[in-house]
Image (cartoon, grey):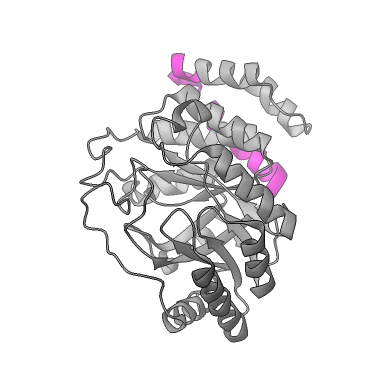
Amino acid sequence: MIDTLKNKVLRGEDLTEEEAYALIELVQKDSSVLEALYEASHEITEHFNGNRFDTCSIINCKSGQCPENCKWCAQSKFYKTDAEVYSLLDADPCVDLAKHNRKQGINRFAMVASGRKLNNNDTDKVAEIVKKIRQSTDIKCCASLGLMSEDQLQKLYDAGITTYHCNMESAPSYFGSLCSTHTQEDKKLTIEAARKVGMQVCSGGIIGMGESARQRVEFALFLRSLNILSIPINILCPIKGTPLEKQKPLSEDEIFITIAMFRFINPKAYLRFSGGRKQLSDIAQRKAIYIGVNAAITGDMLTTEGEGARHDMDMIREMGKVNDESFNWGA
Protein backbone atom coordinates (compact mmCIF):
# COMPACT_ATOMS: atom_id res chain seq x y z
CA MET A 1 0.00 0.00 0.00
CA ILE A 2 2.75 2.48 0.93
CA ASP A 3 4.50 2.24 -2.46
CA THR A 4 1.20 2.43 -4.32
CA LEU A 5 0.12 5.58 -2.51
CA LYS A 6 3.59 7.10 -2.75
CA ASN A 7 3.60 6.63 -6.51
CA LYS A 8 0.16 8.17 -6.76
CA VAL A 9 1.41 11.27 -4.91
CA LEU A 10 4.54 11.44 -7.06
CA ARG A 11 2.32 11.50 -10.14
CA GLY A 12 0.72 14.65 -8.76
CA GLU A 13 -2.52 13.03 -7.62
CA ASP A 14 -4.11 13.65 -4.22
CA LEU A 15 -4.79 10.85 -1.80
CA THR A 16 -8.48 10.38 -1.17
CA GLU A 17 -9.74 10.57 2.38
CA GLU A 18 -10.30 6.81 2.33
CA GLU A 19 -6.70 6.20 1.24
CA ALA A 20 -5.30 8.55 3.89
CA TYR A 21 -7.29 6.89 6.66
CA ALA A 22 -6.37 3.43 5.38
CA LEU A 23 -2.69 4.39 5.49
CA ILE A 24 -2.81 5.60 9.09
CA GLU A 25 -4.68 2.43 10.08
CA LEU A 26 -1.98 0.33 8.42
CA VAL A 27 0.94 1.98 10.19
CA GLN A 28 -0.85 1.83 13.54
CA LYS A 29 -1.47 -1.89 13.18
CA ASP A 30 1.95 -2.84 11.78
CA SER A 31 5.00 -1.05 13.17
CA SER A 32 7.24 -2.98 10.78
CA VAL A 33 6.16 -0.67 7.95
CA LEU A 34 7.20 2.55 9.67
CA GLU A 35 10.62 2.84 8.06
CA ALA A 36 9.04 2.25 4.66
CA LEU A 37 6.57 5.06 5.42
CA TYR A 38 9.41 7.39 6.41
CA GLU A 39 11.43 6.58 3.28
CA ALA A 40 8.41 7.17 1.08
CA SER A 41 7.75 10.51 2.76
CA HIS A 42 11.39 11.49 2.24
CA GLU A 43 11.12 10.64 -1.45
CA ILE A 44 7.97 12.78 -1.80
CA THR A 45 9.67 15.71 -0.06
CA GLU A 46 12.72 15.50 -2.31
CA HIS A 47 10.57 15.15 -5.43
CA PHE A 48 8.49 18.27 -4.83
CA ASN A 49 10.82 20.52 -2.84
CA GLY A 50 14.33 19.21 -3.43
CA ASN A 51 16.74 20.43 -0.77
CA ARG A 52 15.04 23.79 -0.21
CA PHE A 53 14.45 24.86 3.37
CA ASP A 54 12.64 27.97 4.64
CA THR A 55 13.50 29.78 7.87
CA CYS A 56 11.59 32.34 9.90
CA SER A 57 11.64 33.92 13.34
CA ILE A 58 9.20 35.73 15.58
CA ILE A 59 8.89 38.40 18.20
CA ASN A 60 6.17 38.19 20.83
CA CYS A 61 5.18 41.84 20.47
CA LYS A 62 2.16 41.71 22.81
CA SER A 63 1.81 39.16 25.59
CA GLY A 64 -0.77 37.81 27.99
CA GLN A 65 -4.34 38.61 29.08
CA CYS A 66 -5.85 37.00 26.00
CA PRO A 67 -9.68 36.80 26.20
CA GLU A 68 -9.75 33.46 24.36
CA ASN A 69 -9.92 30.17 26.30
CA CYS A 70 -7.63 27.95 24.20
CA LYS A 71 -6.76 25.10 26.56
CA TRP A 72 -3.11 24.85 25.48
CA CYS A 73 -2.17 28.50 25.85
CA ALA A 74 -0.27 30.15 28.71
CA GLN A 75 -1.41 33.59 27.58
CA SER A 76 -5.13 33.05 28.17
CA LYS A 77 -6.55 35.15 31.00
CA PHE A 78 -8.61 32.12 32.04
CA TYR A 79 -5.54 30.31 33.41
CA LYS A 80 -2.97 31.09 36.07
CA THR A 81 0.45 30.75 34.45
CA ASP A 82 3.81 32.48 34.55
CA ALA A 83 3.39 34.08 31.13
CA GLU A 84 4.58 37.66 30.86
CA VAL A 85 1.98 40.38 30.42
CA TYR A 86 2.80 43.49 28.40
CA SER A 87 1.17 45.74 25.82
CA LEU A 88 2.39 46.25 22.27
CA LEU A 89 6.14 46.80 22.11
CA ASP A 90 7.74 49.92 20.72
CA ALA A 91 9.52 49.80 17.40
CA ASP A 92 13.15 49.63 18.58
CA PRO A 93 13.23 46.09 20.03
CA CYS A 94 11.32 44.78 17.01
CA VAL A 95 13.67 46.43 14.53
CA ASP A 96 16.74 45.31 16.48
CA LEU A 97 15.64 41.66 16.59
CA ALA A 98 14.67 41.67 12.91
CA LYS A 99 18.12 42.98 11.96
CA HIS A 100 19.82 40.47 14.25
CA ASN A 101 17.91 37.56 12.77
CA ARG A 102 18.59 38.67 9.21
CA LYS A 103 22.31 38.77 9.92
CA GLN A 104 22.08 35.11 10.90
CA GLY A 105 20.58 34.28 7.51
CA ILE A 106 16.93 33.96 8.58
CA ASN A 107 14.47 34.70 5.78
CA ARG A 108 11.37 35.91 7.59
CA PHE A 109 10.38 37.85 10.70
CA ALA A 110 6.89 37.71 12.22
CA MET A 111 5.13 40.10 14.56
CA VAL A 112 3.06 37.91 16.91
CA ALA A 113 0.52 39.31 19.37
CA SER A 114 -1.75 37.75 21.99
CA GLY A 115 -5.46 38.41 21.95
CA ARG A 116 -8.48 37.79 19.78
CA LYS A 117 -7.51 40.64 17.47
CA LEU A 118 -5.72 43.99 17.48
CA ASN A 119 -7.67 47.21 17.70
CA ASN A 120 -7.18 49.78 14.95
CA ASN A 121 -4.68 51.84 16.95
CA ASP A 122 -2.44 48.84 17.57
CA THR A 123 -2.82 47.80 13.94
CA ASP A 124 -1.58 51.24 12.90
CA LYS A 125 1.34 50.89 15.32
CA VAL A 126 2.31 47.49 13.92
CA ALA A 127 2.17 48.93 10.41
CA GLU A 128 4.58 51.70 11.42
CA ILE A 129 6.93 49.19 13.08
CA VAL A 130 6.96 47.06 9.94
CA LYS A 131 7.78 50.09 7.81
CA LYS A 132 10.79 50.78 10.06
CA ILE A 133 11.89 47.15 9.82
CA ARG A 134 11.68 47.25 6.04
CA GLN A 135 13.76 50.45 6.02
CA SER A 136 16.44 48.75 8.15
CA THR A 137 16.74 45.28 6.60
CA ASP A 138 15.54 43.18 3.66
CA ILE A 139 14.02 40.45 5.85
CA LYS A 140 10.52 39.44 4.76
CA CYS A 141 7.81 40.43 7.23
CA CYS A 142 4.97 38.25 8.48
CA ALA A 143 2.31 38.71 11.14
CA SER A 144 0.17 36.63 13.49
CA LEU A 145 -2.22 39.06 15.13
CA GLY A 146 -5.47 37.16 15.53
CA LEU A 147 -8.74 37.66 13.70
CA MET A 148 -8.30 40.66 11.42
CA SER A 149 -10.59 42.56 9.07
CA GLU A 150 -9.81 43.06 5.41
CA ASP A 151 -9.19 46.79 6.01
CA GLN A 152 -6.69 46.03 8.77
CA LEU A 153 -4.94 43.43 6.65
CA GLN A 154 -4.75 45.83 3.72
CA LYS A 155 -3.01 48.35 5.96
CA LEU A 156 -0.50 45.71 7.08
CA TYR A 157 0.10 44.54 3.51
CA ASP A 158 0.70 48.10 2.36
CA ALA A 159 3.24 48.50 5.19
CA GLY A 160 5.22 45.47 3.98
CA ILE A 161 3.74 42.34 5.55
CA THR A 162 3.64 39.67 2.86
CA THR A 163 2.46 36.64 4.87
CA TYR A 164 -0.31 36.27 7.43
CA HIS A 165 -0.30 33.43 9.92
CA CYS A 166 -3.49 32.07 11.46
CA ASN A 167 -3.34 28.55 12.90
CA MET A 168 -6.33 26.24 12.58
CA GLU A 169 -4.77 24.39 15.54
CA SER A 170 -6.40 20.94 15.23
CA ALA A 171 -8.90 18.78 13.36
CA PRO A 172 -12.37 20.26 12.91
CA SER A 173 -13.83 17.36 14.90
CA TYR A 174 -11.57 18.19 17.87
CA PHE A 175 -11.15 21.98 17.85
CA GLY A 176 -14.41 22.66 19.68
CA SER A 177 -13.22 20.69 22.70
CA LEU A 178 -10.09 22.87 22.90
CA CYS A 179 -11.56 26.35 22.45
CA SER A 180 -15.09 27.76 22.69
CA THR A 181 -14.51 31.52 22.33
CA HIS A 182 -13.87 31.47 18.59
CA THR A 183 -14.28 29.01 15.74
CA GLN A 184 -12.30 27.71 12.81
CA GLU A 185 -14.83 29.50 10.59
CA ASP A 186 -13.65 32.77 12.18
CA LYS A 187 -10.10 31.84 11.25
CA LYS A 188 -11.09 30.92 7.69
CA LEU A 189 -12.59 34.38 7.22
CA THR A 190 -9.28 35.95 8.27
CA ILE A 191 -7.33 33.72 5.88
CA GLU A 192 -9.69 34.58 3.03
CA ALA A 193 -9.32 38.30 3.78
CA ALA A 194 -5.51 38.00 3.90
CA ARG A 195 -5.48 36.33 0.51
CA LYS A 196 -7.84 38.94 -0.89
CA VAL A 197 -5.41 41.77 -0.09
CA GLY A 198 -2.50 39.86 -1.65
CA MET A 199 -0.88 38.07 1.28
CA GLN A 200 0.43 34.53 1.42
CA VAL A 201 -0.98 32.49 4.30
CA CYS A 202 0.57 30.18 6.84
CA SER A 203 -1.58 27.88 8.97
CA GLY A 204 -0.92 24.78 11.02
CA GLY A 205 -1.42 23.75 14.58
CA ILE A 206 -0.39 21.73 17.60
CA ILE A 207 -0.16 17.96 17.87
CA GLY A 208 -0.29 16.03 21.12
CA MET A 209 -3.32 17.80 22.64
CA GLY A 210 -5.25 14.57 23.13
CA GLU A 211 -6.39 14.15 19.55
CA SER A 212 -6.29 10.72 17.91
CA ALA A 213 -3.94 9.71 15.10
CA ARG A 214 -6.98 9.64 12.81
CA GLN A 215 -7.78 13.23 13.80
CA ARG A 216 -4.24 14.28 12.91
CA VAL A 217 -4.90 12.87 9.44
CA GLU A 218 -8.22 14.72 9.39
CA PHE A 219 -6.32 17.90 10.24
CA ALA A 220 -3.85 17.39 7.39
CA LEU A 221 -6.77 16.87 4.99
CA PHE A 222 -8.48 20.01 6.31
CA LEU A 223 -5.39 22.12 5.66
CA ARG A 224 -5.15 20.66 2.16
CA SER A 225 -8.76 21.71 1.52
CA LEU A 226 -7.71 25.28 2.39
CA ASN A 227 -4.69 25.09 0.04
CA ILE A 228 -2.24 25.82 2.85
CA LEU A 229 1.36 25.58 1.65
CA SER A 230 3.17 26.65 4.83
CA ILE A 231 2.17 24.44 7.75
CA PRO A 232 3.68 24.98 11.21
CA ILE A 233 3.73 21.75 13.22
CA ASN A 234 3.94 22.52 16.93
CA ILE A 235 4.41 19.77 19.51
CA LEU A 236 2.46 20.51 22.69
CA CYS A 237 4.52 21.78 25.60
CA PRO A 238 2.21 21.16 28.55
CA ILE A 239 2.20 24.39 30.55
CA LYS A 240 1.46 24.45 34.26
CA GLY A 241 -1.82 26.18 34.96
CA THR A 242 -3.45 25.27 31.64
CA PRO A 243 -6.04 22.48 31.24
CA LEU A 244 -3.52 20.45 29.23
CA GLU A 245 -0.72 20.65 31.80
CA LYS A 246 -0.83 16.88 32.43
CA GLN A 247 -1.25 15.80 28.83
CA LYS A 248 0.81 12.71 28.01
CA PRO A 249 3.52 13.53 25.43
CA LEU A 250 3.58 11.90 22.02
CA SER A 251 6.24 9.31 21.30
CA GLU A 252 8.90 10.03 18.69
CA ASP A 253 7.27 7.62 16.27
CA GLU A 254 3.89 9.30 16.73
CA ILE A 255 5.54 12.58 15.75
CA PHE A 256 7.39 11.02 12.79
CA ILE A 257 4.19 9.33 11.58
CA THR A 258 2.36 12.66 11.76
CA ILE A 259 5.05 14.37 9.67
CA ALA A 260 4.93 11.57 7.10
CA MET A 261 1.14 11.66 6.89
CA PHE A 262 1.15 15.45 6.48
CA ARG A 263 3.72 15.03 3.70
CA PHE A 264 1.68 12.38 1.88
CA ILE A 265 -1.42 14.60 2.09
CA ASN A 266 0.31 17.96 1.49
CA PRO A 267 3.25 16.97 -0.73
CA LYS A 268 4.18 20.48 -1.90
CA ALA A 269 3.79 22.22 1.46
CA TYR A 270 6.52 23.57 3.68
CA LEU A 271 6.13 21.60 6.91
CA ARG A 272 7.53 23.96 9.52
CA PHE A 273 9.14 22.78 12.76
CA SER A 274 7.74 25.14 15.39
CA GLY A 275 7.16 25.25 19.15
CA GLY A 276 7.92 22.22 21.26
CA ARG A 277 10.52 20.56 19.08
CA LYS A 278 13.19 20.98 21.75
CA GLN A 279 11.55 17.97 23.38
CA LEU A 280 13.21 15.97 20.61
CA SER A 281 16.87 15.03 20.62
CA ASP A 282 19.15 16.33 17.87
CA ILE A 283 19.03 12.88 16.28
CA ALA A 284 15.22 12.90 16.31
CA GLN A 285 15.08 16.41 14.87
CA ARG A 286 17.35 15.36 12.03
CA LYS A 287 15.20 12.31 11.38
CA ALA A 288 12.11 14.55 11.23
CA ILE A 289 13.85 16.72 8.63
CA TYR A 290 14.80 13.62 6.65
CA ILE A 291 11.19 12.42 6.71
CA GLY A 292 9.57 15.65 5.64
CA VAL A 293 10.19 18.79 7.69
CA ASN A 294 11.55 21.48 5.35
CA ALA A 295 11.07 24.72 7.25
CA ALA A 296 11.61 25.97 10.79
CA ILE A 297 10.90 28.81 13.16
CA THR A 298 14.13 29.60 14.96
CA GLY A 299 14.72 31.25 18.33
CA ASP A 300 12.21 31.38 21.18
CA MET A 301 8.61 30.32 20.52
CA LEU A 302 6.34 32.79 22.31
CA THR A 303 6.04 31.40 25.85
CA THR A 304 8.05 28.21 25.25
CA GLU A 305 11.74 27.78 24.56
CA GLY A 306 12.75 27.12 20.96
CA GLU A 307 16.01 26.36 19.20
CA GLY A 308 18.72 28.94 18.65
CA ALA A 309 19.27 30.20 15.13
CA ARG A 310 22.93 29.15 14.97
CA HIS A 311 22.08 25.58 15.95
CA ASP A 312 19.30 25.45 13.37
CA MET A 313 21.36 26.89 10.54
CA ASP A 314 24.15 24.40 11.26
CA MET A 315 21.65 21.53 11.34
CA ILE A 316 20.10 22.63 8.04
CA ARG A 317 23.51 22.68 6.36
CA GLU A 318 24.51 19.33 7.87
CA MET A 319 21.32 17.79 6.48
CA GLY A 320 22.22 19.01 2.99
CA LYS A 321 19.45 21.59 2.92
CA VAL A 322 19.69 25.03 1.33
CA ASN A 323 18.19 28.03 3.09
CA ASP A 324 16.20 29.35 0.12
CA GLU A 325 15.75 33.09 0.52
CA SER A 326 13.97 33.57 -2.80
CA PHE A 327 11.16 31.10 -2.28
CA ASN A 328 7.53 32.19 -2.11
CA TRP A 329 4.94 29.46 -1.62
CA GLY A 330 2.10 31.46 -3.17
CA ALA A 331 -1.33 31.87 -1.64
Q: Position of residue 138 (x, y in %)?
A: 63, 78
Q: Nearer the viewer, residue 139 or 135?
A: 135
At 57% from the left and 33% from the top, the residue drawn is 220
At 41% from the left and 31% from the top, the residue drawn is 254
Q: Main secondary structure of the magenta part?
A: helix
In the rendered image, which quarter is residue 134 located in? bottom right
At 24% from the left and 40% from the top, the residue drawn is 245
Magenta-drawn segment: 27-49
Q: Position of residue 243 (x, y in %)?
A: 26, 38
| Location of residue 192 with respect to 256 vertically, above or below | below
In the image: residue 91, left or right of residue 236 = right
- Residue 30 visible from this viewpoint: no
**Count of numbered circles in the view:** 0
Q: Position of residue 47 (x, y in %)?
A: 71, 42
| Location of residue 223 with respect to 274 vertically, above or below | above
Q: Is residue 253 magenta?
A: no
In the image: residue 208, left or right of residue 329 = left
- Residue 12 visible from this viewpoint: yes
Q: Is residue 37 magenta?
A: yes
Image quadrant occupied by the N terminus: top right
Q: Position of residue 156 (x, y in %)?
A: 62, 68
In the rendered image, which quarter is residue 22 located in? top right
